[in-house]
Structures are given as structure tokens and as C-alpha cells.
Image: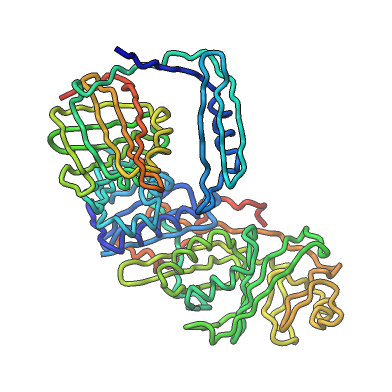
Amino acid sequence: MHCVVTGGNVKVLAKAIHSLSRIGDDLYVEPQEDGLALRSVNSSRSAYACFLLGDNFRCKMAIKSVQSVFRSLTTLEKTVEKCHIDLDEQKNRLTFTLHCKHGLLKTHNLSFQDSESLQAVFDKDSCANVFRAQPRLLVDTVVHFPPSLEEVTVSVSDERMWVRNHVEEEAEASKAMLTELCLASDEFDHFAVQAHNSVTFCLKELRGLLVFAESTGLPISMYFDEPGSPVVLSVTDSVLEGNFVLATLSDDPSLRKNSTHTVAPPPPDDFMNDDIDSYLIAMDTSTAPGPSTTGPPPPSLADATYRPPNKKFRSLFFGSVLPPSSQMSTQPMTSQEVLASDSDDET
Amino acid sequence: MFLEDLVALQINLTVLLDCLNIFGGTTTPGISTALRMCYKGYGYPLTLFLEEGGVVTVCKINTQEPEEPIDFEFCSTNVTNKVILQSESLKEAFSELDMTSEVLQITMSPSQPYFRLSTFGNAGNAHYDYSKDSDMMELFKCIKTQTNRYKMSLLKPSTKALALSCKVSVRTDNRGFLSLQYLVRNDDGQICFVEYYCCPDEEVEED
């Protein structure tokens, strides 16, 4: 395999690698007919990202070593004219050759190991809820949450999206801080809701995509279904397609809020308890015992009868080997084959 | 005939640095510190007079028995290969060097790759090639292909001088000993040189 990346695309390649490094420790490289696929997955297999750079060999290597090839983005921009990527199957070596200004040539020979194909099984097009926004919108939203925040919950209705931090059930209401932002549909380039759902996923792994999208100016598309199914965020332009697939907390049926609830129009929350009275109390903001909410709120966390759900991040569905001609992004979810076990107990 | 006395004394470097920075490390534009060093001879302390903004500080540093500095016996007549580079390009390379590599290998040759810095780290190896026609290359005089390895830990301290310099000369002699000379220009245009010598780490086949 041999490919050449020129001009500004070298920086794009570098940024893609930097954002993949926030997902996992290994970089999976797979040349495909339509381009070069760079993928990474985290250790618990709850976050996966793939960049397909375009225009049934597979290998993987430590991301950090590839990242070091493209360490300084500012220097890259100024000095690198083009980048050659060559694969030497006999020697198990991937070579990045950066042709820089002033006659300087940087050659990095990185060793790799053979690996099986890494491909998450997901189907963006069949998701009930589809959104597209300029990266600035999401970046400005996320900035309100502390960098240490692990999980965030996104809830949608026909006209609005709420983004709030996910507070652990064990957290004391008096010590917990709830931050919630409401985004109107007109702030998005595209806002299509078919199911009023809430999904909770890990924010940390998303930040890598946000940095990438903001610096390249590409709009971010978001797809999700019901809780438990992964949320997919993607960026596309003429030279690349990037997909970040994040697992969401699954719904515990015993605690799921009855969707025919007459109080309108709250987004059904995974963790609502089924005590209607306490929910109505929470709606009245003047007497809300816990953190105050504006607009259609989720139930008050200070509610003493609140029962915490079982938390389960279902791992993503991975096919172990996929036919080489399959289009990665539109692989239908034919098999619900869980290869990695959940971190918590199974129901 | 009048023979010049060679005066040698040894002092603690940290103490000297503390004294030189006695007015604080930061430099305020327009304000300079003046220094006068005096030494009366064997047995006397080294006296530093530092003046800044009308304030004078006197520091007396006790001296120690001087040790013989190592003589690398590096002389120009034995130099086989020499290049002079503009520091800017080397600064970039050194900042990116794979620190998991124990050695830095320097190849100098009249033919390709001309001037090459190589590292051998955990992930793989990397090469930085400077063409002899590069506009960063001010002088290129290589008569024989030489490849030598030097311990990265020994060369690391030289990056401080590299950062301050505008030009650097890299020379190797017939034994593979390395001489790095950095040209540093002060704020007031004065030129000074910093020199590093390093012996090669191991025998490498010379083609």
C-alpha cells in the first residue's frame, strides 16, 4: 500500500490521529477501496471512532507512536509539503515520509502488528433522531461542563434538545450540581426527531471529535435511537468521513417512565422513577427541593423516593471479520453479537 | 619572554548561578546588570561585584582545588566531516526526537543522505535528512561517509545552547568524536560560542 497526502490534508491527517488518540491506545490501519481507514476503540469497547480518508491487509499499532510523527500541528502546517505513507508487509513496517521545506526529509518507520479488522456495527441511516450542527454550537454547549465530567445526557423533544450532566445515583443531592442547557431546533442545521428519547454517553471521548471538527470547521451530524443503542457522531467532507460511535446507558425496563404520561412535554428520562407525584413536585420549580430546573425538567434528584437504576453501558456490537467490500458506515445491525462483556452484571 | 599565567579555579556552579541571579532572574528592558569578577590568587575567594540600578552586591565564593578537565583531543586537522546549519531547522528536529531511543545516530556523507539524524525507539526508527543543497545548510564539507552513535542522555543538555543559537557547526573526527559549536548572539549583538564534545557510543561500520 502506498498513499500520498499533500498540502493542507497532512494537517487534517494529523488532527484525525490526535482525535483518535483520545479514544484508545491502538490505531488500526486498514486500506480500503475507497480510502484509508484509521480506527480506534477504547479498552471497555464503549467508544469507537473511525476516519476514512479517501480517495486485506490490516494492521494496528500504538497511537502514541503515530501521534509523535505528527506531534506539532503548528509546525506541520508551516513546514510539511507532503506526506507519503507506505506499507511494507514483509517487514511489518508502516513508513511515514514527510517532505518538508528547506530540503528536510523526515522518515518514520513504525512497526505494527497484524490484527483482525476492527469495525463497529452500526447503521446511522436507520436512527430515529438525526441532527446536524456547526461545531461551534456543540463546543459552546460542552464548555459549560467541567472537564472531569464523565457522562452527559441528551434529551430531545420535537423542538428542543436538552443537554445535562449525568449525576451518579449514589451522589448526595446536596452535593451534586446539575447543569442543563436547552438548545432550540433553529440553532441546528438539521433537526429531525422521531422518538422523544434520552441517551447518556461518555463526554470525554466525544471531546476528541469536537476538537477535530472545530479546527476543520466541519458540521457535526448526530444520530441516535433509544437508550442502549449507540449514538453516532460524524463529520464529512470531500476528503474524509469520520464516525465516532459511543455506547449509551441502557434503559432498565423496571424503571422506565411510562411514555403515556400526561404531563407535557417532558422528554422521557431513563432514570425517572415511576412515582408520578414526586415527578409533579419536581415540575413546580418554586418548591423543587433539589437543583432548580427551568422548562420541562427531569425529575428532581433530591426526591427521596428516587430509585437509582442499574447502570449498564452496553458494549458496542463488533463483527469480528467483515467482508472487505462492505461500506463501513452503513452496515446494518444484522447481528447483535456482543463480543465484549458489560462492565456491570447482566440482567 | 613573558609567559601568560593560566589561572584555574573551581567553584560550585549552583552557587555561581545564584549569585549571578541575585537581582532576580527576570530581565527588565532597559535595565542591565553589570558584573566584575576579581580573583586575588590561590587561597582567595572569587569575588563578584554585581550592580543594578545603583545597588551593588558583593559575593565571595569559596574556591576548590581545580580538577583537570577532560581533554577530548579534538583538533581541526583530524576533522573528517563538517557541516554548518542554521539552528532553526535543527531546533525543530531536536524537539521531535524520539526520547525512547537511547542513542542519536549521526550520519555524515558526501553522498545521500548527506546529513542524517536517526533514532531507534520503542515504536520504530526515525530519520531526519538534511540535503546538502538545503538553504538551511551554510557549509557542507564531508569527505568520508561516517555513521556514529551518541548517547541521547549526553546530547540532551546541548539542546539548551541550540535553543539560544542561530547557527551550529557539527564536526566529526577520524575517531568519530563529535564537536558541536553553537553561535549565540546576545541582545547587544555580541557573539559568543558554546562548544560541546561527545565521544561515540559504540563502533559502527564505516562504509
Of A342 and B124, the residue lying toward us: B124
**For residue A138, which quarter of the picture?**
bottom right
What quarter of the picture does the C terminus of chain A occupy?
bottom right
Numbered disc total: 0
Q: How is the image coloured?
A: rainbow
Q: Residue furthest front?
A: B1
Of B49 and A69, the residue lying toward us: B49
x, y percent for residue B165: 36, 42
x, y percent for residue A17: 40, 55
Of A127 and B39, the residue lying toward us: B39
x, y percent for residue A32: 29, 58
Above/below status of B192 relative to A282:
above
Above/below status of B67 relative to A155:
above
Residue drawn 29% across and 12% down? B1
**Left or right of B127 in this view: A21:** right
Residue drawn 23% across and 32% down? B107
Q: Can residue A84 be seen in this view?
A: no
Above/below status of A233 relative to B154:
below
**For residue A251, which quarter of the picture?**
bottom right
Q: Can residue A257 be seen in this view?
A: yes
**For residue A265, which quarter of the picture?**
bottom right
**Left or right of B157 in this view: A137:** right
**Left or right of B190 in this view: A156:** right
x, y percent for residue A14: 37, 56
Above/below status of A106 relative to A144:
above
**Left or right of B29 in this view: A184:** right
Residue drawn 14% across and 27% down? B144
